[in-house]
Image: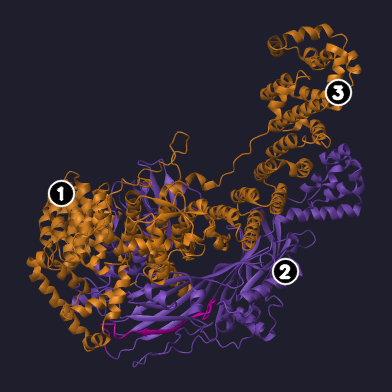
Amino acid sequence: MTDIEALYIFDAHNNCILEHVYASRPPPARTVLPLYLAHPSPRPSLLHLPNTTPPVLLYSLVQDQLLFLSPHTSDTEPLLVLEFLHRVADALEDFLGSPLLASRIESRYDVVAQLLGEMCDGGLVASTEPNALRDLVSTESWVGKVMGGLGLPGASSFKHPVGPPPSLPPVPWRRANVRHTSNELYVDIVETLLVTLSPSGLPLRATANGTIAFTAKVSGVPDLLLSLTCAGGGKQAVEKTVRLPVFHPCVRLARWRERPGTLSFVPPDGRFVLAGYEVDLLAGRGLGGDVDIPTPNAVGSKGGSSGAAASAAKLNIPAAVEVQTGLGPSGSEFEVSLFLSPRSMSSSASSSSSSLGGASTPSGSGGSGGGRPGLNRGLSSSGSNPLAALSSFSSAGTSQAPTLSDILVRIPLPPSVKSLPEIRPSRGEAMFAAADMAVEWRIASREVTGLMGAGRSGGGRGAAPAATLRCAVVGMVSDDEDEEGEEEDGDAVGGGVAQWTGGRVAETWEYDDPSAMAVSYQNEPALTGQNKKRARKDAVEKERERDERRAKQNAVLMPSGAIVSFQVKGWLASGVRVESLNVDTRASRGLGAGVTPFKGVKYLTVSDEGVESRC
Amino acid sequence: MESISRISGMLEAARDLTLEAAHGASTARPARPPRPLPLPQLKKLLESRSERDVHDGLRRVLTMTLTAPRSATLPLFTSVVNQIASPSPLTRKLVYAYLLAHAEHAPDTALLSINSIQRALSDPNPQARATALRVMSGIRVPAISGIVALAIKRGAADMHASVRRAAALACPKCYALDPATGPSTLEEVIAQLLVDKAYWVAGAAVAAWRAVCPDRWEMLHPAYRGLVRKLVDMDEWGQIVTLRVLTTYVRRCFPRRVKRVRKQRVGAGVDEKGVTEAGAGAKNKVATEDDLKNFYGEDDDTQGRKEQEDAEGDESSTFDSPENYDEILQLDPDLDLLLRTSLPLLQSRNSAVLVALARLYSAVDSPTSTPQTSTYLDRAVGPLVALLRSPVDIQLIALHNIVALALSRPAPFVPYAAHFVQRASDPEPVSQLKLELLTLLFAASRPPSTPSDGTPTRALILAELAHAMRARRSPALVSAAVRALARCARAADPTTAAYCLRLLLAQLRAPDARLVGETLECVRVLVQLDPGAHARTTVVRLARSLDGAAAPMARACIVWLVGEFAGLDPADNIAADVLRVLVKGFADEDESVKAQIVLLAAKVYVHWLNVTKDEREGAEAAAAGKDRGAQQLGEQQSSINFLGGEDEGGFADNVFDTNATFTTTNATNDDGPKSSDPFADHPIPLLWQHTLLLARYDTSYDLRDRARLYRALLATPSSTELATLLLLAPKPIPHAPSPSEGHQHYVLGSASLVVGEPGGGADSVAGLGLPGYEPLPDWVEPGREPNPKLRDEGRGDEYSSEGRGAHVPASEKLDEAAAAQPAEKKANGLKEKSLDDWLEESEGEQESEREGSEEEETETEEETEEETSEEETEEEESEGEERDRLIR
C-alpha cells in the first residue's frame, strides 16, 4: 500500500529532467510520456493507461510549464497523489526560488534529491511542511559558499543552521531557532472574482474566492492574533461573509468557532497560505426571483445594456462587458461594450459591503456612501505594548485609491469562424488569436486611468460604455452556397401535411416556431406548397429573406459571451479587511522584548478570466 | 485552497516574473548545469581531501542519478560510499541519496556502508538517528533485513518521537524487503507505535499497519480511541490513512443497530441541528436527555454509559419526522466519538482529507439514511463544494466525487447549484461533470416540503443548459448538454418539460448532423414518455422539419417517430401523407432512412387494416373467399409478374405454397376483383404496394429482406393480429442513465471511481475496480462484532486520562488546560528569558537526553513529554504552553 510510486518531471519541451522512483517498479518516464501526450488536450489529471506493463494510473500536474507525472500500478486515492504533487512543486519553489524553472532544478539536483527523499519515504508521504524540510535538507546557498570559505555562518534572511538543529521544533510546521534581524509581518488578501452574468445582465453567480497569504519573518516562536472585519459590523458579519473557510493547520479552530474572524496561530517561518474562504457577492439577494429563463430576443436590446452595467455596479464589480450580436445588415457583426464603475470600488468598503453582510440595506443604495475606504485606519494596537500601525507598502494601488489595471477582454468564438476582417476598438488594442479562437482586447493601464477619471466625473452609473469593440465575422461557409438552398422543395412535407389533414394540425400547435415557414403554414393552410413559394418570391421579400437567412447562418458564428480579466489593487470585492494583527507577547517566545515587527497589509482583487457575460 | 505559488504569482507583478523567467531561460540554461565529467575525473573529485571538491563531485553524481540511467553512475559506488563517514552532514546526506538509488544494483558493495549507518543509529542527534533509520531501511538488499528489523525495534523504543516515526515508516520497507522477516517482530513494533501518544507517530504507525498487516484488525482495538483523539492533531497524510482505515474498521466492528421507535410527542427534544458540537450539545439538552432516559428505559438498558446518552440525545432530531415510527440509528459511543471528533477536519486545507471524511460519513450513512447520521454527511457537502476553488486538476477529481455523492443524495447540494455554473475557462471534462451534476440537482431541487426555493434553482439550471448548447464550445459538450436537458425534462413538471423540449427542438437547426441526431434521440424518449401530449404537436412539427433535416440519422429517427406515434389517432393521421412525400424521394435517401420508410409504410398499412377491419369483414362475408384471394392477388401479383426470380422462388415455396397456386390460377382476372373491392383503390394499400416495389429493387439486401418480412407479415389482410403485435407493440422507454451512474458503487475517493471499469466489457464483474481497489465491507452483523471492551485502553496513558469521562477532542481539552493556567505564571517565567538562554536550555536538554538513554525504559513517558515540549525547566507551564500552541 504505497501512496507514491514515482515522480517524473519534464520541462517545457517534454524532456525528462528528473526521474525518481520511490517504490515498486512503475514504467519508466520514457514509456509513460508518449502515452500521456497521446491523450488529446486538455488532459485530465488522472489517466488510466491499460497498455503499459503493468497497467498504470497516471497522475499529472502542470505548473510553471513543468509537467509532473506520477504513475501508479494500483488504486490509490487520487487526491492524495495530486496534493502531494502540489506540495512537491511548492517545496521546490520554496527551495529553488520562484518561478520554478527547469534550469533551476537542473542546477540544484543535490537539493532536489534530498527534498524528494525527505518528502516521501519508501512510498509513504513523510514530511511536506516547508519549514520541517528546511530543517531536514542541507543546502549550501551561494552565500554559504562564499561565507563558508571564511568560516563564518551565512548571514542572510534565508539562513540555515550550520549544524543540525539540536532537536525537533515544538510545532511541526515551524522550524526551530528562527532568527531575523528585521522582523516583518505581511498579510496579503487576494480575492479572485467568479462572476457570471446572464444575457439580461442579472448575475447567475457571483462569488469571490479569497485567500489570505501570510509572510512571517519574525524571530523565535511568535503567537499571532489576526482579526478580520467586514464593514457591516461585528463578528456576525464576518461569519456571514466569509463562508466555507479552510485553514492552515496552524490556525486554532476553536478560536475561530468562538469568534469568527479571529485567527490565532503560530505561523511557520516564511510565506504560506493562512486561510481560504469564499464570499457570495449575491448574499442577501440570493437566487430568488432574480434569475429568469432568458428569452432569446432580449439579447442586445437597450434594456439589456443598462442591465449589465447596473448589475456590475450593484455587484461591486469594477468592470463588466456586454456583447451584442447579429448586428449589421447581414448580422455578421458583433459589438462588445466595456463598462467601468469606478464608484463600486471606492464605496465598497463602507456602504455596499454592509449590504453584502446581510444587513437590510437594499443594495441599490451602495453608491451613495461617502467613499471613505476605511481600509487604512491603522490597526488598533493592544495592551501596554504599542505596535506599529499597519501600513500599505505598495506605492501604487493603496486602499485609499484603488487602481484598476490590466484589463483584458477575451471573446471566444466558435470554431466555424474563419477570420475577422474588421476589428475596431474604440480604446486599446484588439487582435484575433486564431490559435485559441478568440479575440483579445487589451486596454493599457494608462488608458484605464483616463477612463476611470472620465467615469468619475461623468458620475452616471454605467450610463454609457467606457469603450466599445466592434468586429465583423466571416465563417467557413461562403455566402454563395445558401442561394441554392433557398429553392425549397415544392412538395415539402409540411405543405403536404396541410393538404392531407385539412389544416387541423395548426389549431393544436403550441410552439412558436421561429421559422418563417410556420407562419405561412398556419396562415395559409389551404395553399399548396408550390403556391406558397411562388407567392413569396417577390423581389423585396426575397432580398429580405436572404438577409434573414444570412443572419441566421451568421448567428452560428456569433460569440456566446465575453470574459473580462483585470486587477484591482487596494480593494477587496467582499469588503473584508484586516482589523488588527497582534503579537501575543505572553505566548510568544524568542522575540526580544520591545521588538515591534513591521506589519503590512495588501489587498488585491483579481479577475483571472473571472467576469463572464453571456449573450 | 490555492497553492502559495499561485498566490505569490498574483501578488508579484506578472511582468517581473516573466522577465525573470526569460532571463533564467536565456542565461542559466546553458551555463548552470555542471557539464558531465568523465568518470575518472569524477572519481578524483570524490576522493579528494577538500570537502568542497567532494561536494562538487557528489552534486555531479546526483545530477546523473536523477537524469541518467543507473549504469552511468554505478561505477562510482565505492568512491561515493567511502564518503559516508564524512563529518559534514551535507556530504552524508548526499551520499545517502546516492546510496538509496543504487544499493539495489550493487548489493554487495552496499553492505560496506551498513556499518557506518549503524553507527549513526546511535547518534546523539535524534534527527541523525531518524535519517539513519530511514536510509538503512531504504537500502533494498534482502540480506540486511534482519539488521533492519533490529534497528526498527530499537528505533521504536527511542525516546524521541521523530525516531519512532521513522521506525514506523521503516516497517513497510522492511516488510517489502523480506516478507518472511519476522512479521511478528514488525507487528509487535507497530502495535506499540499505534498506541504511541505522540500524534505524529500514530499516523505513520497506521500507514505501516496498513502496509504490513492490513488484516490484523484486532491490533486496532486497543488503539482505536487514542487514534480517534489524536486524529485532529495528526499531519494531513496521517489523517488520510487513519480515516481510511477507521472507515473500514467502523463497518467491521460496529453493527448497524436500527431501532424502530414509536413516536410519542411531537416536538419533544427537537433539535434541528441534529449533530451538536462535541460536548457542547450535551450540556444544552439536559431536559431532553432526561426525557430520553425515561423513554429509553422501557426497552433499552444495555448500555448505561454517558456516551450512550449523548448519542441518544443527538437522536432526538428524529422525533419531528412525520411518520409514526421512526428509525433510530443507534450509534455506538465509540463510533459517535469518531464522528464528532472528526468534524473539525472539515476545515482542512487538504482535499484528500475532505474526501476521506466524506467517505467516512457516507459509509456510516448508507444504505438507508436516517436523519441523524445524514447530518454529518450534509456537513461535508459544503467543504466538498469548496474544493472547486482548488487548482483545476484537483477540481476534476473532486467533481467526480461530488457527482458520485450527489447520485445517491443530491438534496444537500442544491443550495450550491450556482457553484456548478459553467465557466468559459473550464476544461472539457470539468464542464461535462458540471452538466451532469446540474441535472442531478435539477431532479432534486424541488423538495415537496419547500416549494418556494426549488424554482429559481431549476430556472438557473435550465438557463445554464441552454447556454451550454448555444455556446458550442465543443461538439461533445453540446451533446452532453442535450442529454442533460433531456434528463431534466424527464424530471420536470409539464410546463418546464415543454420548455426543455422547445430548447431541444431549437437544436434541430444545428449544422452538426451528429448533434441533431443526438437531439432527436432525446426528443424521441420524451415523446415516448408521454405520447398523448406530443403525438399531435411535436411529431407533426418534426415531420415538417423533414424538409430541412439533412442528417440521415435524424431523418431516420423522425420517420420512426412518425410511424410510432402519428398513427395513434386514426382520425387525425399524418403518417400516410408523410409516407407519400417520402416515397417520392425514396431512391435518394440513405439506407437507414429507407429502412425506416419501409417500416413506416408497414405501420401505416397495419393501422389502415385495423381501422377498416370491420367494414372489410362485412365485405368479406359477402364476397366469401374471393375477395381474400383478390386481395392476396394484389400483393402476390407483383412478385409473380415482376420478379419471379430465384430468391422469390424459395420464399413462395415455403410460405405461400397454397397461395401461390391460388394466385396463379387467378392471375388472369387481375383487374376484376380490384375494381370491385372498395378498399383496393384506397391510397394506403397502393402506397404500401409502391413502397414494397421500391424496396424490392433496392441494392441493399438488408432492405430487401426487411421488405420481404413485412410483406409476409401483412400478406393476409384479414388476420392482422401477428402484425399488430410485431409492429405496434408499445416500445420500451430507453433508460437514460446519468453518465457516472456506472461508477457509483465505488468507494468515494478511489481512483476506480474516477476511471471506472478498466475493461469495460460485459464480462468484467461490476465493483471489482482497478487492481488494488478495496471496497467497503458490509456492516458487521449484530452479535458478531468484537467485544467493545477490547477498545478499553488497558493502561492509563495520558490521552485516556485527559479525555476520560467525555469524548472531548484532544484539542478542546488542551484548550481548557491552557485556560486553566494562571496567567501571571506564564508572564514571569518567559518574559525575561532571552533567546540565548532559551537556546542554551534546549542544548542542555539534549545532553541530558544523551545521558538518560539508559533509563529510557523507566522514564519514557516523562522524557518524551519533555522532548515534544522542548522545555526542561518550568515543565508544567511549558506543557500548557505547548498545548495551547497545538490547538487547532
Dot 3 crowding, Cα within 10 Å, few <14, some 14–19, many 20+: few
Is A286 on the left-hand or right-hand side of B704? Answer: left
Colour applied to chain B: orange
Nearest to N terminus: mark 1 or mark 3? 1
Mark 2 falls within which chain?
A
Q: Residue A442: image x %, image y %?
A: 60, 71
Between the C-alphas of marks 1 and 2, the distance is 75 Å
Q: Is residue A423 or residue B726 the one in the foreground?
A: B726
Residue positioned 79% across, 30% down in the render: B583
Question: SS class of the residue under badge 2?
Answer: helix
Please state the horizontal and vertical placement of residue B65, each as a whole percent of the image.
Answer: 26, 55
Q: Which mark is residue A304?
A: 2
Q: Which mark is residue B615?
A: 3
The stretch in magenta equals: A568-592
Q: Colour of chain A?
A: purple
What amino acid is at disc 2?
A: Gly
Q: Chain of mark 3?
A: B
* B204 magenta-colored: no
**Residue B95 as seen in the image, left or right of residue B848:** right
Residue A61, picture quadrant = bottom left
Q: Depth-wise, is mark 2 or mark 3 nearer the camera?
A: 3
**Quadrant position of residue B538:** top right
